[in-house]
Amino acid sequence: SEELDALLQKSLSPLQANAFTLSIYFGRNLAARYDRLSLRLFNLFQAPLLRAQFVRDGHWELQSIRAIAAAEIPSEHHQFVVRMAREHFAGRCHLPRKRRAPHYYLAILYDPSEQEAPSNPRAMQRFVRAAEKIGLGVELITRDDYARVAEYDGLFIRTTTSVTHYTYRFARRAAAEGLVVIDDPESILRCTNKVYLAELLNRHRIRTPKTLVVHKGNVDAIVSELGLPCVLKQPDSAFSRGVVKVEHQAALKQTVAKLLDNSELIVAQEFLPTDFDWRVGIFDRRPLYVCKYFMARRHWQIVHRQPGSGKCLEGEVETLAVEAAPQQVVQTALRAANLIGDGLYGVDIKQVGRRCYVIEINDNPSIDAGLEDEVLKENLYRIIMSGFLKRIEQQKHLPPVPL
C-alpha cells in the first residue's frame, strides 16, 4: 500500500547499502528505529518470527518476507526474542488493580495525532471512566495494534472512518473475530457512501433536499432540476470535506468535471440556506442528544476550512435535551438512522418551516466533552458503555455480570 511504502522509504532512507535484511520478532526489531516498520509488517503477516529482505533500485522495495524457525535466530538475538515473546503473550496492558477483575475488555481505537478527532481528550477520558465504573476493562489502542484485535471482546472506533482507511480494516477484522464493533463495517460502508444514502432515503420516502445522482451522461440536468446555487458531494465526503457549493454555470462545469475524474458518480443537491443544522445523536435505536450546529461566521457550512492557511473555523453549538427538541426532527432522524442499523449515528437535518430534510447520516459522530454531552453529562458515556456491555454479554450467551 502507499502508506506502507511511505513508511518503508522513511525507515530505510539513512542506509547506504542497496540491500537490507530485517528480523521481526513478535512485531519488534532490536533497533528501535525499525519498530514501526516491523509492527506494520507483523500486522500484515502474522507469524511470530519473520525475516524480510529489502532491495533498493532507485527506491526501497520489499523483495521477500518469510517465517523463520527458532533455529535461525542468531544467538545474540536470543535474549531479546525471549523478552518480546513474554510481552506478546502477556497480552493487553495490565490495568490498575480493582476490587474485581473485568469480565470483558473493550478496545477504543483512536489516533492521538488526529486534528479533528470525533472525540476530544476529555471525552475519551469520560468513556474510559464510564466503562471502568460498570466493570468493563478498557484500553486505548492505535493503528499499530491491529494484530491484537482478537484479544478483546469489543471494539469502539473513535477516529474518523473511511472504507479506504485502516479503521475499516479494523472493523472488518473485529467483526470476523466475533467482537462487538461500533462502528460496524456495514455502517461504515453505508454511511460513507453518499450515493447509497441518497438512493436509500429516496426509496423509503424520507424527505431530503432535491437530489440528483450525477454521472457524465446527465450533467446538463443539474441546473434544470436543482437550480443554482447547488451543493456537490463526492461519494465519500465527510465532516464538510468533499462538499462544494457552486453558484455559477462556469464553476458548476469545472467542479463537476473535477469530481467525476475521481468518481463515476457524485451527488448534487439543491441548496437550502439555514442558520443551523440539527444533529440528532442516536445509539441502539434511541435518541441520546440533539444539537444545533450553527454555520461558521460568513460561511454556508458549520465548518469553514480556509484554503491555503489550514485554519478551521467552526460555528457555535447548542445542545438540547431530546424532549426539548422538535419531535418531528427527532422522529425523522430515528427513521433515517434505523435504515442503517442499531449502532451509533449522527443524523444531520435542515428544518425549513415545518419540513425536515435529512442531509446525511453519519457513522462515528462527534461526541466532545462540553458540547454533545452538555445535557446528559457523564450519563451519555455511561449509556454507550452500558450498551457495549449488554451486547458483549448477549454475544457470549452468558447471563449478565452483577455490577
Image (spheres, rainbow, N blue to C red):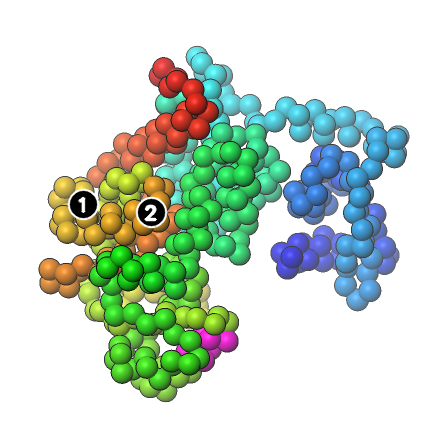
Q: How far across and down, in percent of the image, does residue 134 sit?
A: 37, 23
Asked if 176 appears above or below 64 in the picture, the reply is above
Q: How far across and down, in percent of the image, does residue 194 sit?
A: 38, 62
Magenta highlight on residue 256: yes
Magenta highlight on residue 216: no
Magenta part of the protein: which range?
255-261
- Decide which of 285, 119 is in the foreground and name it: 285
Amino acid under label 1?
Leu
Residue at the spot of label 1: 320
Q: Residue at x 19, y 48 (%)?
A: 330
Q: How far apart are labels 2 and 1 at the CA level?
A: 17 Å
Q: Report which quarter residue 33 is drawn in.
A: top right
Q: Which mark is residue 397?
A: none
Question: Which secondary structure lies at badge 1?
Answer: strand
Q: Which mark is residue 345?
A: 2
Q: Report which quarter residue 157 is drawn in.
A: top left
